[in-house]
Image (spheres, rainbow, N blue to C red):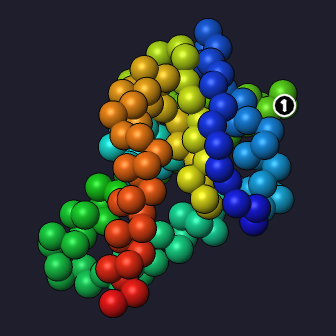
Amino acid sequence: MKFLSGKVAHQLDAKNRIRIPAKYKAAFPKGEVLYYVEYAPGCISVMPESVLSRKLASFDEVNPGDPQMMEAKRRIMSCIDEVAEDGQGRAQIPKSFRDYAGLVKDVVTVGMGDYVEIWAQDKFEQSVGGMSIQQANALAYKRNTEQER
């Protein structure tokens, strides 16, 4: 799978549908099912099945006798839905996902390495607007340095 990066501004249509931008869609594994996921606060993610499966692997061996882990698994699994595209490549975003991310009309799709995030444009600008690229690089460098220790 090709590395997903950058951002694309676009809009929901009157029926709450979007087209996943071509640059991202072409990078997803061909023929693989895509899923909407409530993954990070403030946005919805779109992940191919292989990426989602890898992220959910920790739940493979959850003991049904562990009520807290079962509750967490239930919560996470109930916030995943298949992306269903029509014949013209448009995908309706279910109301629960639109509500979760506050999507109304103007959206930004952001490449996040192996998946994409869909943000309400104003929320995206608020989310990243307070951090300079220098601050972001400093945080990433600090984290990488700590992991190497």
Is 44 placed above or below 54 here? above
Rendered image quadrant of residue 13:
top right
Residue at the far bottom in the pictured view = 149
Q: In which quarter of the image is the N terminus?
A: bottom right
Q: Is residue 96 left or right of residue 74?
A: right
Q: Is residue 16 at least partly visible in the picture? A: no
Q: Badge 1 local density, few (<14 within 10 Å), some, or many (20+)?
A: few
Residue lying at 41% horizontally and 40% vertically, measured from the top left: 132
Residue at the far top in the pictured view = 14
Residue 93, percent from left and from top: 55, 30
Residue 34, percent from left and from top: 65, 52
Rendered image quadrant of residue 108:
top right
Q: Is residue 124 left or right of residue 110?
A: left
Residue 68, percent from left and from top: 15, 70
Q: Is residue 70 at least partly visible in the picture? A: yes
Is 77 placed above or below 17 here? below
Residue lying at 56% horizontally and 53% vertically, measured from the top left: 112
Q: Nearer the viewer, residue 102 or 121?
A: 121
Identify the residue under disc 1. 87
Residue 106, percent from left and from top: 55, 17
Q: Nearer the viewer, residue 36 or 126?
A: 126
Residue lying at 53% horizontally and 14% vertically, measured from the top left: 105
Q: What amino acid is labelled 1 in the image?
A: Gly
Instruction: Report helix, strand or loop for mark 1.
Output: loop
Rendered image quadrant of residue 21:
top right
